[in-house]
Image: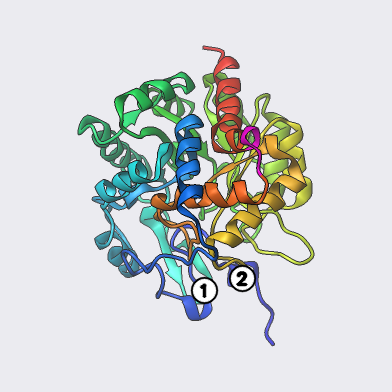
């Protein structure tokens, strides 16, 4: 057998496919729902809905309706197909209401325009950005996201305290985030403008190694967080913006933890072990370092070694066993995940019912659904220096 590279092993993340799955999964606008793997009684579901009303749920990483693909230009052919199957925000927001989800991080995708889906590799950058392209794409995406609030489909949340306002409005809360710091091009001024736009978190690296750090699914270029990355981390701390280290190569992530004076997030990943390895998973050492810094790990329902919602529940408990309940949250990657086993917000009560059946106490459920994320957000707000 030929040597498998890290890229050749990729099978999860935004639109990701490899081997036999190449090009087949994510080209369907709404695949058949993933199986539950268990039965939920009416009594269990009613109890779960009551708990979701009591403990508002927040999804820490999502792409509801794939707003990031709206009006995108310069795309590779397969990405043009993906764009044509995007723009279904109203449907997903309706699912949020039906599933009793209170809020979600709506993520733009900074490197979307330059990505390509390559057989046997997955997503990678196929070309450099044209001058000004990354910034223009960001501004287009954030305008499209903010239009969801203008159209009163969601309520924009610029601070943790606004969760109560969103619930009172009967609209899902929307927290603007960006996946990939490419659009910044190392500019502190652009970072401040993004904050003024309402962006409250940035995933520093996505599938394109940028001037901040290496992507975890690429060959090593920088070997750590760069000096530019250091400066961006420090400025995000100063602004009170949450730092998301998902997709960052391990050396850079450890450096970011060292530089940051405030808790960070890995919003959508899992932990590698002797029996469960994947290039998009992080090491136990890195996860524990994040937890020791009071950070959080988002349980990620990508269909990697799990095939149903019951498997995702087991994954959540494994994360809790490894880093503690205070450091685990929900990071669904909704509408842009690979073979997700939690693929419709209407199934959130089913997931809650199963977590309860498996022994999750109410206090633990509350921590998982919202308290852990809100703690990190508040810590960053309190640490804000301007």
Answer yes or no: do the residues labelled 1 and 2 have beta carbons within 8 Å?
yes
In the image, 260 versus 64, the foreground residue is 64
User: What residue lies at 55% left-to-right and 30% top-to-bottom?
Assistant: 242
The stretch drawn in magenta includes residue 363 = yes
Q: Looking at the image, which residue sits at the far left? A: 151
Q: CA distance from mark 1 to mark 2?
A: 7 Å
Label whose residue precedes the other's in the sequence (1 or 2) = 2
Indicate which disc residue 9 carries.
2
In the image, 169 versus 340, the foreground residue is 169
In this rendering, the answer to whether 138 lies above or below 270 is above
User: What residue lies at 76% left-to-right and 47% top-to-bottom?
Assistant: 322
Horizontal placement of 318 versus 129: left or right? right
Q: Quadrant of residue 343?
A: bottom left
User: What residue lies at 24% left-to-right and 62% top-to-bottom?
Assistant: 84
Magenta segment's dominant SS is helix
Tell me residue 358's x, y (percent).
66, 51
Q: Which residues are magenta?
A: 360-364
The residue tagged 1 is: 18
User: Can residue 101 be seen?
Assistant: yes
Horizontal placement of 316 versus 169: left or right? right
Quadrant location of the N terminus in the rendered image: bottom right
The stretch drawn in magenta includes residue 267 = no
User: Can residue 247 be seen?
Assistant: no
């Amino acid at each position: 057998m030929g040597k498998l590279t890290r890229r050749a092993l990729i099978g999860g993340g935004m639109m990701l496919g490899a081997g036999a799955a190449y090009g087949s999964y994510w080209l369907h606008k709404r695949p058949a729902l993933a199986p539950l793997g268990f039965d939920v009684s009416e009594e269990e579901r009613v109890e779960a809905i009551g708990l979701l009303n009591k403990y508002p749920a927040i999804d820490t990483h999502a792409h509801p309706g794939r707003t990031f693909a709206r009006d995108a230009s310069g795309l590779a052919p397969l990405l043009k197909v993906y764009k044509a199957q995007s723009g279904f925000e109203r449907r997903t927001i309706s699912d949020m209401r039906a599933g009793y989800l209170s809020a979600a991080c709506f993520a733009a995708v900074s490197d979307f325009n330059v990505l390509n889906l390559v057989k046997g590799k997955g997503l990678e950058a196929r070309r450099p950005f044209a001058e000004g392209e990354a910034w223009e794409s960001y501004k287009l995406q954030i305008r499209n996201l903010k239009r969801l609030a203008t159209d009163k489909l969601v309520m924009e949340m610029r601070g943790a305290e606004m969760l109560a306002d969103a619930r009172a409005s009967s609209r899902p809360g929307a927290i603007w985030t960006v996946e990939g710091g490419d659009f910044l091009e190392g500019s502190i001024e652009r970072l401040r403008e993004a904050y003024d736009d309402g962006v409250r978190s940035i995933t520093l690296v996505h599938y394109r190694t940028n001037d901040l750090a290496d992507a975890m699914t690429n060959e090593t270029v920088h070997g750590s967080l760069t000096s530019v990355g250091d400066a961006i981390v420090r400025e995000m701390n100063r602004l009170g913006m949450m730092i998301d280290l998902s997709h960052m190569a391990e050396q850079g992530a450890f450096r970011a933890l060292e530089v940051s004076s405030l808790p960070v997030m890995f919003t959508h990943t899992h932990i590698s072990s002797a029996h469960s390895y994947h290039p998009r998973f992080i090491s136990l050492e890195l996860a524990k370092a994040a937890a020791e810094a009071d950070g959080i790990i988002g349980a990620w329902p990508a269909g990697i070694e799990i095939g149903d919602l019951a498997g995702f529940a087991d994954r959540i408990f494994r994360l809790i066993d490894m880093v503690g309940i205070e450091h685990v949250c929900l990071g669904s990657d909704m509408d842009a995940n690979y073979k997700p086993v939690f693929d419709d917000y209407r199934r959130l009560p089913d997931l809650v019912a199963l977590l309860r059946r498996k022994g999750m106490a109410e206090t633990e459920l509350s921590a998982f659904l919202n308290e852990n994320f809100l703690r990190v957000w508040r810590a960053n707000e309190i640490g804000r220096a301007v």
